[in-house]
Amino acid sequence: MRMFTVGLDNIDRISAVKLYIPSDVHPPEARKNIGASVKEVQKRFPDGVPLLDPIKDLGVKDPEYKTLISRAEELTKRMSEHKLMTLMEDDERISKIKKFQDRAELMEHAKAIRQEAKVFETIAMKEDLKKMKKVLRKLGHVDASGVIQTKGRTACEINTADELVVVELIFTGVFNDLNVEQCVSLLSAMTFDERNKNEDDPLVGMKRYLSSPFLKLQEVARSVVKTTISCKIEANEDEYVEKFNPGMMEAVFAWSKGAKFIDVQKLTNTFEGTTIRTLRRLEELIRQIANASKAIGNTELQAKFEKGSELIKRDIVFCSSLYL
């Protein structure tokens, strides 16, 4: 018999059988007696020594303990009946368990990497948010303390089109000098997003009372995008300005004047569905601007856009169903 020192993590189970150990186990005779006692215990319990019972021997009375023990026994039984334990050789079983452990470690590593990536993404978004807040300060939507101003409250009402450009059009007085039909047709350039790359300049041949407001829209859009670029936000000035398409302005002007849909369609190079979609989006934008005008107390502009909504919201374009 020999003596070894082991830690608590090396102990798997504790037996209910207790052997009395001499105070000094260094003499060979003492260790021999201990060995004889161990052999005697193994002889008396050939099926294995009884284990320490937590309830009977240690007096554990917590009712939850019995539930946990029954679950553990059930899991142990299911594990022993699993095909991994019954149908596979030891080497194959160990190999599959090792692969599963490697997979679990890789998944945990991937989870950590995704969390780290999310942190970096948040940092990047914070930088973008700082730049956006700077744009809003320069355009007068918020003050130096971040408090929302009148422009900001107006922009909160707009979500159908570019709210920064719409607000600038309102506060620079572009709509003040236009009649209702001109306002409606100008706004169609912000809801019509279909462009034919092969067509000539859409302003060629356009009536001055429509082309002049559109040129003001382009000036406002260019001013907004320059402010955005000055705040270190990446943007292409020409692409930003060109996204406002005047291709439907004449058709919308005619529609707001009471023209029939078949006659309006002759003024466009689009399908009927595109025209209807543009007019529906336009009506929604007009309602939002009317609400924005009401929020800032501009009753004159509110009345103008409410009238514009009445002019275009009619006929087949706003039928709930074409089959009714």
Image (spheres, grey):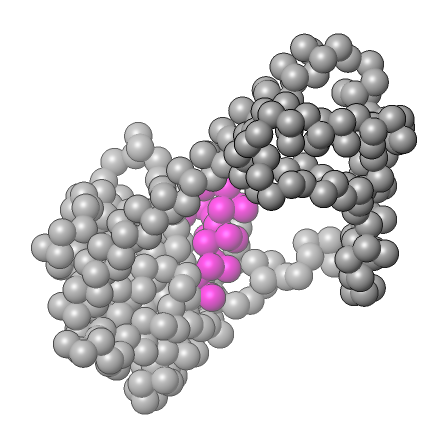
Q: Position of residue 101 (x, y in %)?
A: 58, 27
Instruction: Give the residue displayed 45% in from the left and 46% down from the top.
Output: 266
Q: Quadrant of the C terminus?
A: bottom right
Q: Quadrant of residue 269?
A: top left
**Of 128 and 141, the residue lying toward us:** 128
Q: Is residue 283 magenta?
A: yes
Q: State whether residue 23 appears in this view.
A: yes
Number of marks present in the image shown: 0
**Rendered view: 156 above or below 95:** below
Q: Can you name the residue that lies furthest to the left here?
A: 230
In percent of the image, x 18 and y 78: which residue is there?
145
Place residue 28 in its image quadrant: top right
Write the start and end of the magenta stretch as one range: 264-284
Q: Quadrant of residue 149?
A: bottom left
The N terminus - image quarter? top right
Q: Is residue 156 left or right of residue 222?
A: right
Q: Nearer the viewer, residue 16 or 315?
A: 16
* Residue drawn at x 49%, y 46% as measured from the top left: 274
Q: Which of 146 and 64 lies nearest the eye of the viewer?
A: 64
Q: Position of residue 232 (x, y in %)?
A: 13, 51
Point 64% across, 27% down: residue:
29
| Residue 306 among those drawn in magenta | no
Give the main secondary structure, helix, strand or loop, of the magenta stretch.
helix
Report whether residue 208 is seen: no
Residue 191 position, x and y percent, is 39, 55
Which x, y percent locates residue 82? Answer: 82, 25
The vertical placement of 142 against 197, above or below, is below
